[in-house]
Image (spheres, rainbow, N blue to C red):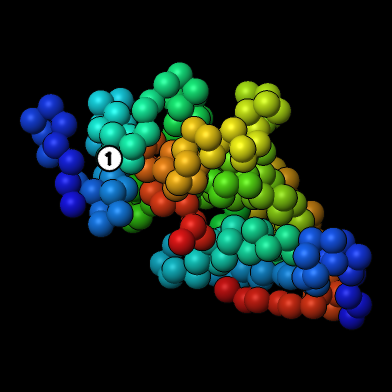
Amino acid sequence: MALTVGGNTIETDEEGYLTNLSDWSEDIANEIAKVENVEMGPNHWEVVNFLREYYNEYQIAPAVRVLTKAIGKKLGADKGNSKYLYELFPYGPAKQACKIAGLPKPTGCV
Amino acid sequence: MTETRDEIGLEAGGGVRKKFMFVNRKAPYGTIYALEGLEVVLISAAFDQDVSLAFLDDGVYQLVKGQQTKGLEVKNFSPTYRALEGYDVEKLYVEREALEARGIREDQLLVPVQVVSAREMGQLMEQQDVIIGF
């Protein structure tokens, strides 16, 4: 599979995750979000940027439980719960938000 | 060996909480064992078990700071050991003899660990329900 953004073709795997993490840009994130039927607002970006920082630091995409806890710690308890995160990313914060953030599929996520 | 915290297991839906120890004996690169072992640990953390990690032999190299993998053309996955705390995996045991034999000091390790003697490591292993080696 591939995405076309601004005339450039970006490789993805069969599930839509970027093949090369370094291809990521905000435009590409918006394009993936469109495919996922997610309208990106400030709260979505907050999670996506958080995931990118997490990946930079630890070199993995976090499990949902770990993501939820870490977001709660950083952004407050009203955001560190699965209800909030599933409202933003209905098909699963780890799966969908990671895809938009250009990260690989979380380890152990099927 | 005793089953611990059965009551917590029951609260969590009837599951039994067991003591799992993952034993890492190999250098981080050159074989897939270290990376695969770490992934298994991260996945197992989702099952709310009592997880600990042991580092013996060349496995202690997995935790050394400042790994440079560019020349090997593989990903440096060592930062991921620092994510273990967020997965509530906080029991990391490193064998003192293995460190000493390789001239590695505790302050050269990426994460806080408990350095234990080979004898103490044996006692820890004795307490486990399940031991998985990589």
Quarter of the image with the C terminus of chain B is bottom right
Determine the residue positioned at 47% across, 38% down. Answer: A89
Q: Is residue B110 above or below residue B50?
A: above
Mark 1: amino acid:
Val
Determine the residue positioned at 25% across, 36% down. Answer: A23
Farthest residue to the left: give it.
A7
Kindly identify which chain the residue marked by label 1 belongs to.
Answer: A
Report the front residue among A52 and B92. Answer: A52
What number of labels is visible? 1
Report the front residue among B66 and B12. Answer: B12
Q: Position of residue B76 (x, y in %)?
A: 43, 49
Badge 1 density bin: few <14, some 14–19, many ≥20, Cα 10 Å:
few
Image quadrant assignment for residue B100: bottom right
**Would residue A57 be visible to someone looking at this image?**
no
Tell me the SS state at disc 1.
helix
Report the front residue among B71 and B49. Answer: B49
Q: Position of residue B25 (x, y in %)?
A: 60, 71
Quarter of the image with the N terminus of chain B is bottom right
Q: Which residue is mark 1?
A: A35
Q: Is residue B114 above or below residue A99?
A: below
Left or right of residue A20: residue A73: right
Q: Position of residue B86 (x, y in %)?
A: 66, 44
Q: Is residue B33 above or below residue B111?
A: below
Determine the residue positioned at 18% across, 41% down. Answer: A3
Image quadrant assignment for residue B18: bottom right
Determine the residue positioned at 72% across, 70% down. Answer: B21
Q: Position of residue B11 (x, y in %)?
A: 85, 61
